[in-house]
Image (cartoon, grey):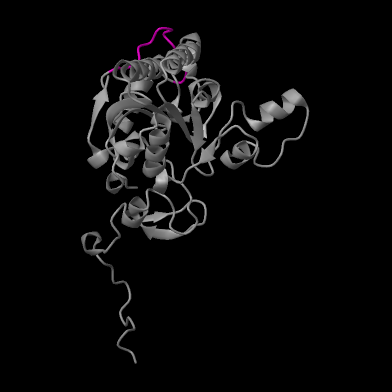
Amino acid sequence: MTWFKRTEKGIQTPTELKKEVPDGLWYQCPECKKVMQTSAHVLNSYTCIECNYHARIGSKEYFELIFDDNQFTELDPTLSSSDPLEFTDSQAYPDRIKASQKKSGLKDAVRSAVGKMNGIEIVISCMDFKFIGGSMGSVVGEKISRAIDYSRKHKIPFLMISKSGGARMMEAGFSLMQMAKTSAKLALLDREKIPYISLMTDPTTGGVTASYAMLGDFNISEPGALIGFAGPRVIRETIGKDLPEGFQSAEFLLEHGFLDFLVDRKELKSKLTDLLIILKGKVTEVPQENIKA
């Protein structure tokens, strides 16, 4: 049985003849370490087929999951940040913006769009964490405000999908003012009785949590999302007490009344559709055969 033994030493296979697995063919869950085909992970709405871990995704993926046939019209797609403070840390702020735009393919940390979800018109603003940590700068606040204005003008429900590390330090006070601006716009939306649903994903922190993320008619979240304002260490040092385990998880917030319900991403489209039908009180408007996950 020597047919499978190498008798000659020093044999090397040329690089061009080596068989390698193509990039992106496999996905490993960071939670349970399960390895699965990337195609299976995508078909499962970017959740683990073993433990249901919800991987971080961006506006591209959420729009694909929610809008019918991925058909939508993007609102204000060309807005980009300026440099009002001429801020420089390890690099100048304009250079950081350009680098992030090139790397992510995005103009800033939020995209807004209007389209149909199971036949119901909806306006969605969705944050992207891969653009400077999903930080909230003046462009983020302005695009969300304009999306709310569009929703008010056309009497269309508004969905905010938050994923952010908080306010953008490179814009200082300009960034913090977006909390007040977006909150004021949402007050106008509420006054006109137009539904606003806030979906918090992992992570939703800082000034975003302290403003529009927590102002929904319904505040909902994906399972396992980190949601909070300040970090655990800062809170512990401020109040001088040890904190409960997992106190900033979506499950903990649901238990203590900060969230209305959790929604599995695989059921997100159908749950949002059901919720809007209930809010609008027009159950007969959407035929049941059109409602799909």
Instruction: Tell me if residue 11 can be seen.
Output: yes
Q: Tally the marks.
A: 0
- Residue 131 x, y percent position in the rendering: 39, 28
Q: Which residues are magenta?
A: 79-90
Nearest the camera: 279 or 223? Answer: 279
Estimate the x, y position of residue 175 in percent, counting from the top left.
47, 14
Q: Nearer the viewer, residue 89 or 112?
A: 112
Picture quadrant of residue 94: top left
Query: Based on the displayed image, in which of its 4 quarters is residue 108 positioned?
Result: top left
Please tell me which residue is depicted at 34% across the width and 51% down the height of the picture.
42
243 sits to left or right of 22: right
Does 88 appear in magenta?
yes
Which of the image's four quarters has the N terminus?
Answer: bottom left
Residue 271 percent coordinates (x, y): 41, 42
Q: Farthest residue toward the bottom?
A: 1
- Residue at 34% x, 15% y is 149
Quarter residue 114 falls in:
top left
- Main secondary-structure element of the magenta-colored stretch: loop
Left or right: residue 86 versus residue 78 is: right
For the view shown, which residue lies furthest in the right direction? 240
The front one of 86 and 205 is 205
Q: At which x and y percent is residue 156?
A: 33, 24
Q: Is residue 202 visible?
A: no
User: Is residue 105 found left or right of 183 in the rendered image?
Assistant: left
What residue lies at 32% left-to-right and 42% top-to-bottom?
65
Q: Is residue 246 magenta?
A: no
